[in-house]
Image (cartoon, rainbow, N blue to C red):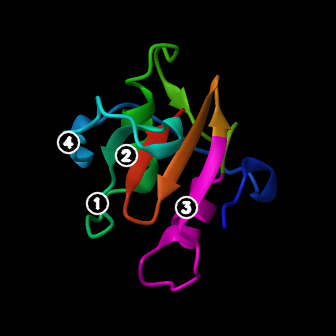
Amino acid sequence: MSISADTVTTSFLSLRRNTDIMAVDPDASTPLPGGWHPLATHDWSDARALETSLCAALEELDTVHGEVVLYEYVDVEAVRDALDPGAMRGVSEVRFDYDTYEVRVSMDGTIAVR
């Protein structure tokens, strides 16, 4: 099951890069099945925000210059609520379009694009 950007309400979110909030995937050069390229892994046990992890990961993309503005593309609070490991909602991933990419956030914290 996945939630697209069309199914969530937009909220205000605009953060600058903070690379201390996520673990960089050591296998990022190896595409995942389906052509997905892992960018980072969000640590759900960390108190830092998912939106901070997403902004930092997306700023690594070639087409992104400057500040990442997520609220135009996705309601990050809805993504966080859907994937929260303690929520037991049965959602395994959320996908949304960002710039020219499709972004996938998995319940294990993997942030990937294709």
Name the residue rendered at 42%, 77% in the picture: 85
80 vs 101, left or right, is left
For residue 53, which numbered disc appears in the image? 2
| Label pair 1/3, CB-CB below 8 angstroms | no
Figure quadrant of residue 112: top left
Rendered view: 76 above or below 59: below
Which one is earlier in the sequence, the residue at label 4 or at label 1? 4
Residue range of the region highlighted in magenta in the rendering: 75-96
Relative image position of residue 49 (x, y in whole percent):
39, 56
Rendered view: 61 above or below 65: below
Q: Report, in whole angstroms, how far the alpha carbon at label 4 lies from the one at label 1.
A: 11 Å
| Label pair 2/1, CB-CB below 8 angstroms | yes
Which one is earlier in the sequence, the residue at label 2 or at label 4? 4
Q: Report, in whole angstroms, how far the alpha carbon at label 2 lies from the one at label 3.
A: 16 Å
Name the residue that disc number 4 marks.
Answer: 20
Name the residue that disc number 1 marks.
Answer: 43
The crowding category of the residue bearing disc 4, from other C-alpha atoms within 10 Å (few below 14, some 14 to 19, many at least 20), is few
Image quadrant containing the C terminus: top right
Q: Secondary structure at mark 2?
A: helix
* Residue 107 highlighted magenta (yes or no): no
Name the residue rendered at 33%, 54% in the picture: 42
Name the residue that disc number 3 marks.
Answer: 93
Image quadrant containing the N terminus: bottom right
Name the residue rendered at 47%, 59% in the picture: 106
Which one is earlier in the sequence, the residue at label 1 or at label 3? 1
Q: Amino acid at mark 3?
A: Glu
| Label pair 4/3, CB-CB below 8 angstroms | no
Q: Amino acid at mark 4?
A: Asp
